[in-house]
Image: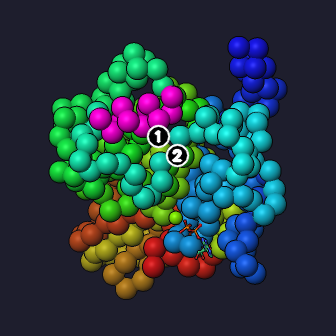
């Protein structure tokens, strides 16, 4: 009991960081897979490691979860050092690996019950916990089916349930939506959002920009074992200094339209090229209506309107010179 109180104290002292990763390096022979990675995650915060295959995401979380030792650097979870031989601090962590670890002959409830007892959970506590989890992962109505009949996505959801059984403070998910059906994908994203609202710290790896944008409070863009940039989505987009663009295609007096469009306050630049008007604007979604009206009033007959906004993909491209998905 005293120990638990001390740990709670330690947590406050560490400024609310559930996870702190400091200058972590991992080499395999003379290859450096993770090259001085640092980041922090607070309670209730979802942190995304966004990067392509081979970036070092799985190696990083394997060290955080204490599955493999770091070559150098420090990892602290709820104020306790994590090493590959530490056992205690691992109770704070729920790891959902990419490879599935469930028994196909057992149903969802039996799988959860098995893993719960393996973790030494109390039988009476376990039953209500399993009900909670089945509801959270959206498998309550399929809980009695053998898991070998499950879709890949349902198995992945059950895997998340297993990771949550012991009420960890940090949930780590390694590309949890790769290869799953759209319904399960959505269910997984919703579960993560709900857990986050309830105060869970989440470490989420992905190479899908849309998932990082939707889920993550802060994102570390990782490539070649290094975090190339870190911040909220808005902060990252500011790095590229990207502006929204509106492209108008049509016929008529484009030059007259260009002059009129230049008079709109949110329009910072107008270019005319053949049958296109290309605009740099401050906030495309709120400006587009006025842009269309102005162009039309100036005598342009529009065939097409296109909005592009800078996104994490453009940030990644700017930082690394390559695409997130090749
Ligand atoms: N056990 C290992 N031995 C040698 N190289 C490895 C090992 N594990 C990972 N790597 C290499 O480290 C790099 C990062 O891998 P990984 O962390 O799995 O990337 P990601 O999860 O971002 O796709 C890759 O080049 C991979 O081939
Ligand atoms: Mg991986």
Residue 100 against residue 15 in the figure, above or below:
below
> Going 40% across and 20% down the picture, which residue do you hit?
123
Q: Is residue 162 visible?
A: yes
Name the quadrant containing residue 134.
Answer: top left
Q: Which residue occupies the foreground of this view, 121 or 302?
A: 121
Residue located beneath label 2 in the image = 95
Asked if the magenta segment contains residue 232, the reply would be no
Q: Position of residue 101 (x, y in %)?
A: 40, 51
Q: Position of residue 136 (x, y in %)?
A: 35, 31
Name the quadrant containing residue 241.
Answer: bottom right
Callout 1 crowding tier (Cα within 10 Å): few <14, some 14–19, many ≥20: many
Asked if the magenta segment contains residue 116, the reply would be yes
Tell me the CA gap for discs 2 and 1.
Answer: 5 Å
Query: Which residues, given as a range, are shown in magenta?
Result: 110-120
Q: Position of residue 38 (x, y in %)?
A: 75, 54
Ligand 1 - quadrant of the structure image: bottom right
């Amino acid at each position: 009991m005293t120990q638990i109180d001390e740990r709670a104290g330690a947590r406050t002292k560490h400024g609310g960081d559930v996870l702190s990763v400091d200058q972590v390096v991992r080499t395999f022979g003379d290859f450096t897979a993770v090259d001085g990675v640092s980041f922090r995650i607070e309670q209730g915060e979802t942190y995304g490691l966004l990067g392509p295959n081979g970036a070092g995401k799985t190696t990083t979380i394997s060290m955080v979860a204490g599955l493999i030792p770091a070559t150098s650097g420090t990892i602290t979870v709820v104020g306790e050092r994590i090493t590959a031989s530490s056992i205690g601090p691992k109770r704070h962590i729920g790891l959902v690996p990419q490879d599935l670890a469930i028994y196909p002959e057992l149903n969802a409830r039996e799988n959860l019950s098995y893993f719960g007892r393996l973790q030494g959970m109390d039988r009476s506590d376990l039953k209500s916990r399993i009900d909670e989890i089945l509801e959270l992962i959206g498998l309550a109505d399929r809980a009695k089916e053998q898991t070998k009949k499950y879709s890949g996505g349902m198995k992945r959801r059950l895997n998340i349930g297993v990771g949550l059984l012991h009420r960890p403070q940090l949930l780590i998910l390694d590309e949890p939506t790769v290869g799953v059906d759209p319904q399960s994908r959505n269910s997984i994203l919703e579960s993560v959002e709900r857990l986050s609202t309830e105060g869970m710290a989440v470490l989420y790896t992905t190479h899908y920009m849309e998932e990082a944008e939707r889920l993550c409070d802060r994102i570390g863009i990782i490539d070649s074992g290094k975090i190339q940039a870190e911040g909220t989505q808005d902060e990252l987009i500011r790095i590229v200094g990207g502006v929204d663009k509106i492209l108008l295609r049509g016929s008529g007096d484009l030059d007259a339209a260009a002059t009129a469009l230049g008079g709109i306050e949110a329009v910072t630049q107008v270019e005319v090229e053949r049958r296109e008007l290309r605009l740099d604007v401050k906030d495309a979604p709120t400006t587009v209506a006025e842009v269309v009206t102005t162009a039309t009033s100036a005598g342009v007959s529009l065939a097409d309107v296109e909005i592009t906004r800078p996104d994490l993909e453009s940030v990644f491209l700017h930082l690394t010179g390559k695409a997130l998905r090749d």
